[in-house]
Image: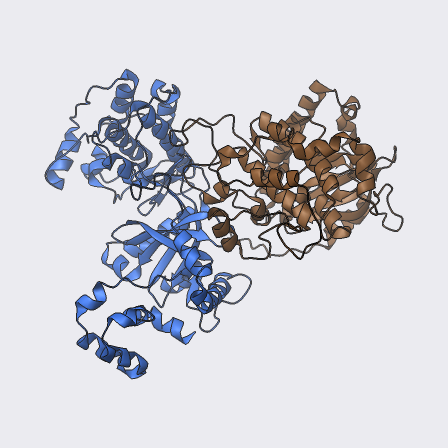
Chain colours: A blue, B brown
Amino acid sequence: MDKENDTERPINVHLSSTEDEQLLHTSGDIGNYFQDEGGSLNFFTRVDSAEIIYHERPKKAKIIGNYLIGHVLGEGSYGKVKECLDTESLSRRAVKILKQRQLKRIPNGVSNVKREIILLKKLHNKHVIKLFDVFVSEEKQKIYLFMEYCVGSLQSMLDNVESKCFPLWQAHLYFVQLIDGVDYLHSRGIVHKDIKPPNLLLSLDETLKITDLGVAEELDMYSKVDCCSLSQGSPAFQAPEIADGAEYFSAFKADVWSCGVTLFNITTGKLPFMADNIYKLFECIVKCEYTIPELDSPHCTDCIKGMLKKDSTERFSIKDIKSHEWYRRKLGRSKEYVPPPPYNKDDMLRRMSVIPNLEILYMEESAESETEVELQHVEDYKKASRQHSNDNKKKGSSVKNFSGSFCKLS
Amino acid sequence: MYSCWNGWKILRRINEILNSNRQSANDISKEEILASNPAELCNINLYRFGPLIGSSCENSVNIYAAERKDTKKPVAIRCVNLEYLKIPLSLLEDELQITGRLHHPNILSFLCSFTNDSYIFTVTNHMSYGSCRDLLHAHFKGGLPEQAIAYILKETLRGLAYLHKQNIVHRSLRGSHILVGSQGRVKLSGLRYCRAIDHLEPTHLSSGRRVIHDFPDVGFQSSLIWASPELLEQNLAGYTVKSDIYSLGITACELANGGPPFDDMPKMRMLLEKINGIVPMLEDSKTVPSCDRTFSNNFHLMVESCLRLDAHTRPRAVELLHDDFFKVTKKRSISEALPELLLPIRPLSRLERGHESDYEFLSNEMNNITCAETIEWSF
């Protein structure tokens, strides 16, 4: 276990990387330092950095809680999203790793994450991303959110094609699901406030999942109006009343506007409002002047117009959209299709990226002892996460269930 | 687990499903059971409860042997305690709905289902030999005789072919879900994880085939050993009804070897081996020199064809029915041969004395359950 703890500290990352065959590449002198435990700090002053950087780190299967971690799926300002595998149910998951240090730098970062977790835990819908587990590692200053595995966002799919837009049938397929998801959120009194293609993910069976509820807001259960006063969403997708700086605005209608801009974007490949800076952009939005490029479907154009009405009382409600011809009429699949972007060219099917790690865990004879350590680690995490059954104040457990840990923060 | 209001809503929902099932069952009215009105059967006091014969889902689902008080007909009753249900309710809803639609001699149908207190009771025919797993446990620790396997698997395949014809994937085909009754009746159960694929559209990446991507991630742990590599892989290719054929291959190994392959290793290792194309085999003198059993060549070939990594090259269920392996079953009828092959195990025909119990026994049990979590009210 001692060795394990060592590698957790960032300073010793290279130390672990020089075990085994890596050691051969460095000079004998350096090797001696590793036998000498006290000398690890000197190491950095004496080794040419090129030598370390260009060595690949030895691959090691990493297990957090009961999840085996795989490759990186994406990166954001808060940290990374990695693929992972539930070691018990064998289901594929994704983990969002948030670095607390980076979170503190983002305005409202910590409170947004807290809100997202609280909201996601009580939402259960096909079109809203599911949150399975939350772990907090105080040692590493990281928060791990284990969620449904998705193949990518609508944005990442659009980025991959020249036209930057979907064929109409595909746009319709996603739009219908988006509206269903938003309808569910609204029925639970939740306003998303940041609907845009990067926040709409697709699962393996092309089910759309709304994600990133960081700036979402839960309305008061007993209030009869959906008033809202704050918005932190992306500027290009904001409704005129928000751009105008209105004190209060109808929150549900603001989401409808963002859905409208999203539909505009995925069918035409363009944004209705664009400007060099945010002031000019807001000016554009408030004027509400835009032109819809010609689309094959007059229904779609009509629907966009209805959703992008400047006056929020004239704007479509979710109910209006659901009875609109564009929502109701199903379009047949054509040959034109924008696929989810592959990780690399050989892997159109999105195969599991944890398989190499599994091989490390089970196939290499030398890894046998390591495996044991890792599995012991799992035990530790598991004990820590079972908050209700046992006290989580157990000494040495570095990871705690989210609610326990954040209670302290708040 | 559920608050009072929630529980009430759930019961109403279940009852709605049950009522609609009952109506559809009346429409068909071909089966002998349906000749009598099932609504009459939906009374817990009609049955005398016997011993517990099985349980699943972490003991939140119990199966009791029972008999009808009026006709003395043996039945099995499954009791699902909604208060302590460990699997999502939607699975049970799906099971009730799908099973209500299926009518085939090789599929265990529900005689009736009804709710009482916080329980859902499901009455089925009593299968006197129990499941194939029970057979292995009771006597055939080293595996069933090859002929018995042929008879059992052939009947299983008939059920499977029927499911596949309806575009339904069983997904949890395994020894414990194949039940054997007196006179060699073999029925497929465990339809909880069934999934219909007829409503799905062929996607572009599956080259125009209808595929499923859904991974049963709750309560499915025990069935993972039988799951096909493509189901476990959870990638964009998805899986089809051929996934069940792989499970059939694993089940064949289970019945022949006395236990399923991959049973001795961690789940993740099993996943790795399956994806890497390691094919389990029948253990006999041809594959394991120390073994003194010998299976026929046809059996080996049949298992090999089921366990192919490439799902498209696996035979379909209807094709498998004509496999050479099943020729041995043509000599004698199953009702004559199977009980003989299964000796010394004899079917459990009557409720054994000393185990008799009544519904009151159950209600006592219910009273004994203490609240696991104290409910706090805050206003």
Query: Does residue A104 sit above or below A276 in this rendering?
Result: below
Q: Is residue A219 left or right of residue B365?
A: left
Identify the image quadrant of residue B328. top right
In the figure, is residue B45 to the left or right of A108?
A: right
Q: Nearer the viewer, residue A263 or B164?
A: B164
Q: Position of residue B363 (x, y in %)?
A: 76, 47
Identity of the residue drawn at 26% across and 24% down: A304
Q: Is residue B45 above or below residue B52?
A: above
Residue A309, image quadrant: top left
Identify which residue, B236 or B33, lies in the foreground: B236
Indicate whether B298 appears above or below A32: above
Location of the C terminus of chain A by quadrant is bottom left
Horizontal and vertical percent position of residue A109: 28, 54
Q: Residue at x 33, y 34 (%)?
A: A252
Left or right of residue B81: residue A303: left
Q: Which residue is rendered at x = 44% and y = 26% of the image?
A: B201
Q: Quadrant of the N terminus of chain A?
A: bottom left
Q: Where does residue A408 sit, x and y in percent of width and height?
A: 39, 65
Residue A11 seen: no
Q: Position of residue A78 (x, y in %)?
A: 27, 54
In depth, the one of B249 and A331 nearer the eye is: B249
